[in-house]
Image (cartoon, rainbow, N blue to C red):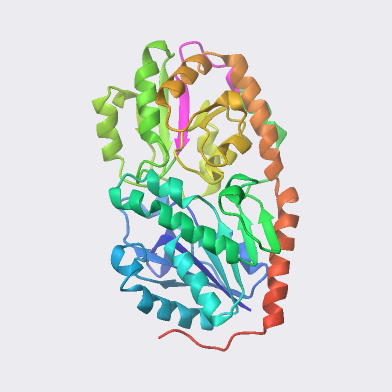
Amino acid sequence: MKLLFAHDNRFIRHDGQIWSEGQFGAEGWARYLDHFDSLTVVGREGGLPDRPLAQLTLSSRDGVGFEFIRDASNLYSLTVGRRLALRWMRALVRAHDAVVARLPSEVGLLAAAAARREGKPCCIEIVGCPFDSLSNYGGFKARLYAPVAAARLRGAARRAAHASYVTNTFLQDRYPTRAGNALAASDVALAPPDRAILTRRLDQLSNRAAGDPVRLGMIATLQGKSKGIQILLRALAEARPHLPPVRLRVLGQGDRRRWLREAEAIGVAGLVQFDGTLPTQNEVLSWLGEVDVYLQPSLQEGLPRALIEAMSQGCPAIGSAAGGIPELLPGEDLVATGDEQALAGLLAARLTDTGWMKRSAARNWERAGDFDPAILAPRRDEFWREFRREVRSRGCAPDARPS
């Protein structure tokens, strides 16, 4: 059986392979290929970024093909061009047995609409809130479109027969579904918990030299403002007189120059280092192992995988109350979304408190154990088996491809 996966992600075609920036690695397709014979990924095509290929993530693998659509997010594509795009998508959906639409995304919504028209089973994966995302993206057009995008996602959730959410309650409350087959499970992929990681972390915190800088870490896209980098930079500037020596390292894709200019303008450029991207999860986890305190000051979130990965490495953590973050961190480690003064105060209080660091490290490591594959895999598998059962009951698609 053939499955179609649709999302707005920009993939990069280079040297006969398909690559991505920091997500949609080849290993991630296994959760679909475990239940379907082949997978076609529909996304947008991006150019090769100005950095080494080794920093990209390989998306290609056996059993996975790729189709690229023109940008479905601009005004023309949302209006005049939608009919042509829908015709193209319907032909592609017709050649497959089922559709997975990852939302929010315009390509995903287009695929879900095509699946309805072609009478093909469709599963939606809700991984974020478009209202929060677009409201905090930074542009007037994005803010204007935010309530429309949220309404479209609510409609897709309401119509879905199969719906997967990365949160336990946050996205479900905003985008409720009537689906008979529903799943609440993060899409993070972790190794089984290893207590040696927590032991090393506690030893590391105990043995820090008094004059060593506190190493702060954040994983975030550098595109737009939704991850709250600007909030963190301003909080560091405000709290600096009350902080021990600190060093902030930021891992993520995008142009660092605008953030370096902002850091320089508020006097914290010397505290900040941008590390680009890393191609594998193991390298990301190793990077997190060098962080003393992890920060997630987002303005919008689903359930941040980076924060869960940091917690799995025993990182003490501070976050905003955006999205599903309160499902992961206790109230004492949260600040109101966008509140740079509260974040400055919490940094001043926490970064000199070794006792808090140890308590937070232990608590976070324990909480990350809830994302053990041994716990999540059976729930995911049952969800996908139920979806596959419906697909089987509908029969198989003809051998056709879009023109």
- Position of the C terminus by quadrant: bottom left
Q: Quadrant of residue 255?
A: top left
From the viewer's side, name the closer residue of 218 and 281: 218
Image coords of residue 380 (percent x, y): 70, 58
- For the point 62% across and 74% down, which residue is it? 121
Q: Is residue 143 above or below residue 241?
A: below
- For the point 39% across and 23% down, which residue is it? 235
Image coords of residue 66 (percent x, y): 46, 71
- Position of the N terminus by quadrant: bottom right
Confirm whether the magenta stretch covers residue 217: yes
Image coords of residue 391 (percent x, y): 67, 77
> What segment is highlighted magenta in the picture?
204-219
Number of marks: 0
Image coords of residue 328 (percent x, y): 62, 36
Confirm whether the magenta stretch covers residue 259: no
- For the point 35% across and 45% down, which residue is it? 224
Q: Is residue 291 above or below residue 403?
A: above
Q: Is residue 95 visible to us here?
A: no
Q: Quadrant of residue 203?
A: top right
- For the point 43% across and 14% down, which residue is it? 243
Indicate left or right for 24 with 277 as reference.
Answer: right
Q: Is residue 311 above or below residue 183?
A: above
Q: Is residue 377 above or below residue 299?
A: below
Q: Is residue 76 visible to us here?
A: yes
